[in-house]
Amino acid sequence: MNIAYNFAFFDEGSKREIRRATLKAIAIPGYQVPFASREMPIARGWGTGGLQLTLSLIGKNDILKVIDQGADESVNAVNIKKLVAKTTGVKTVDDTAEATLIQSRHRIPEIPLHEHQILVLQVPLPEPLRYFEPSEFITKHLHAEKEYSGSWLMLFEQIMKYGNMSTDADHPVMVHDRYVMAPSPIPRFDNPKMDHSDALILLGAGREKKVYAVPPYTKVVSLAFDDYSFEVERFEGACCRLCGAEDVFLDELIQEETGETLHQCNDTSYCISRLNEGSASTTRTAAKIGGVAE
């Protein structure tokens, strides 16, 4: 039985409500705007916040890319693409440069985004103060008073315990010298990409019913101390085993036969594009992506 859906699944009233929240978020960079999170045909925690932003903004001429931790073909990414494509008919691609709307979980693409693109990040926990303050009422007051000593204390405790700031992902950032914001669980490597980005960055949390934004060309600074600076993940002496890239975020792979540690681009689309530019076989590339070299 064929079911007729409204364009982009939502009714027009729902889309307008989400757009209004999005506009407010853009007007106040880093501020968490509550919105009426809708029921979705996927479970909360699987990207419903980002998906609602995507469905409320997408148009018939948009080109969609969806990635999950750097991969275009993961279960999460594939099913979100199928839902959006089925209810809109828009073109879906893996090429970052070609896409106008990019929805991502846990990564910002390696290829620099341009001003005609929108990046939507899926967020599980939008409140950066939640790690030490369980009350929503109190965190709202702390944001209003720009009282972020708890965030600094959290980082200080990490230094005292481990000798450095140990946040592997979701390292808090200061947006436009005003709000401390959770950048979503992207690795520290991706935090600098938010600073003065050409593209609009939107962040949606469906379960927590929050949307917030980093408008283009907005100052975004990762929290750090003068004597303990913010550092991204480094892969000294390592390069991608497939395309040879050195200046990107790499995954570590263990070769079962020898126990040797290998590295591979986390952003599979970026890796494939580099290989194709070098006239490498697309078939060979697709077979190796996500696996270990023979």
Image (cartoon, rainbow, N blue to C red):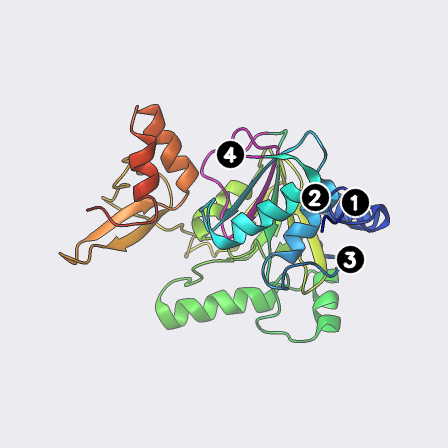
User: Are there few (<14), some (14-19), or many (20+) residues within 10 Å of tag 2?
Assistant: some
Drawn side of residue 244 relative to residue 89, left or right: left
Tell me the residue that label 4 is attached to: 96
Label 3 and label 2: CA atoms lie apart by 22 Å
In front: mark 4 or mark 3? 4
Label 1 and label 2: CA atoms lie apart by 7 Å
Drawn side of residue 34 relative to residue 148, left or right: right
Secondary structure type for disc 1: loop
Please tell me the numbered disc located at residue 35.
Answer: 3
Whether 280 is drawn above or below 131: the answer is above
Can the viewer see residue 263? yes
Going by the numbered disc 4, the residue's amino acid type is Thr
Label 1 and label 4: CA atoms lie apart by 27 Å
Highlighted range, magenta = 92-114
Whether residues under marks 3 and 2 lie with C-beta atoms below 8 angstroms apart, the answer is no
Secondary structure type for disc 2: helix
Tell me the residue that label 2 is attached to: 87
Whether residues under marks 1 and 4 lie with C-beta atoms below 8 angstroms apart, the answer is no
